[in-house]
Amino acid sequence: MTGAGCPATGVGGPTTSWGPTARLSVTWLGHSSAVLDLDGARLVTDPLLGVNAGLLRRRGARPDEALWRDPDAVLLSHLHHDHAELSSLRLLRPAPILTATSSAHWLSGRGLSGVGLRDGEWEPVGTGGVRVRLSPAVHGHRPMPHRPNAAHGHLVRGPSGCIWVAGDTSLYPAMRDLPELAGAPIDVALVPVHGWGPRLSGGHLGPVDAARACAIVRARVAIPVHWGTLHAPASRRLPPGWMDHAGDAFAAALAREAPGCRAVVLGLGERWTAAPAAAA
């Protein structure tokens, strides 16, 4: 994997360009953590900024602070420990955490700025016309007895494009309605493609189902997340290489399932930037 800020290679699909003044980039920090820079607003998804998430361990160094500092908002999909890591969320204060209402209440009780979004409610972020709303997700497996279990994705829309941050989910029929919920085509999809072990539990997407999700929503560009980062301590006794295959497997599946969608497989700390039309 290459270093922070290096351009990633898109795999499959046509060359994609945006308008001449497009301002859209995505930086992958590992697992489900990404930085979305859109029209002057910075958003961090499901931040994992340290070396651990509960009992799970991070492979490689923690993300460089320069990649994620000073966000305008945090997008939190649900409260599982590998997505809602409290010490990481505290590093991002005072940025508001946009999430489900029950999750926001739980976070506010722990000194964090939880902002609960109701279904269909758009929240403005920054001053450049960026808005965020929740999107559905189906992730009911392994409920936690000590935290709320609401699960959602997010739709992020600005003048330069529309991003779907899927969150942990399985396929569901209403996925086809996401462009209508966004009020715009899905330009970029951040989709989970694996996990922190060699086998996935229910409520997750593997590489093939993630590719099918991108076909359903008719995304232009797809960036795989939720892979290659976390492992349990015992995983060092598992077959070598299990952490590394999901990104390429997703790109291959996307070429079959959604040939009109371009896969951009990022390494840890890598950034993809939308190419303005004049430069494409």
Image (cartoon, rainbow, N blue to C red):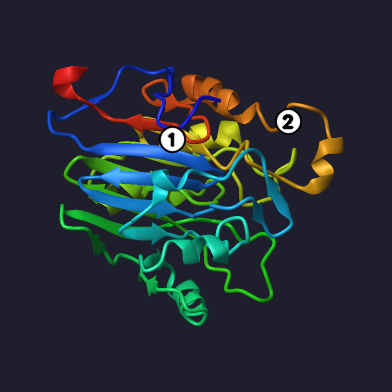
Residue 64 x %, y %: 48, 43
Residue 173 x %, y %: 47, 48
Residue 208 x %, y %: 58, 31
Q: CA distance from mark 2 to mark 1?
A: 23 Å
**What secondary structure is found at the residue carrying circle 1?**
helix
The residue singled out by tag 1 in the image is 214
> Which mark sits nearer the N-terminus, 2 or 1?
1
Near-viewer residue (87 or 39)? 87
Q: Is residue 164 left or right of residue 167?
A: left
Query: Which residue type does callout 1 highlight?
Result: Cys
Near-viewer residue (120 or 95)? 95
Mark 1 surroundings within 10 Å by alpha-carbon count, few (fewer than 14), some (14 through 19), many (20 or more): many
| Image quarter of the C terminus | top left
Residue at (21, 48) in percent of width and height: 40
Determine whether 157 is above or below 7 in the image.
Answer: below
* Quadrant in the picture for residue 13: top left
Q: Is residue 118 left or right of residue 210?
A: left
Q: Is residue 36 left or right of residue 250?
A: left
Query: Which residue type does callout 2 highlight?
Result: Trp
Near-viewer residue (262 or 241)? 241
Disc number placed over residue 242 in the picture, else none: 2
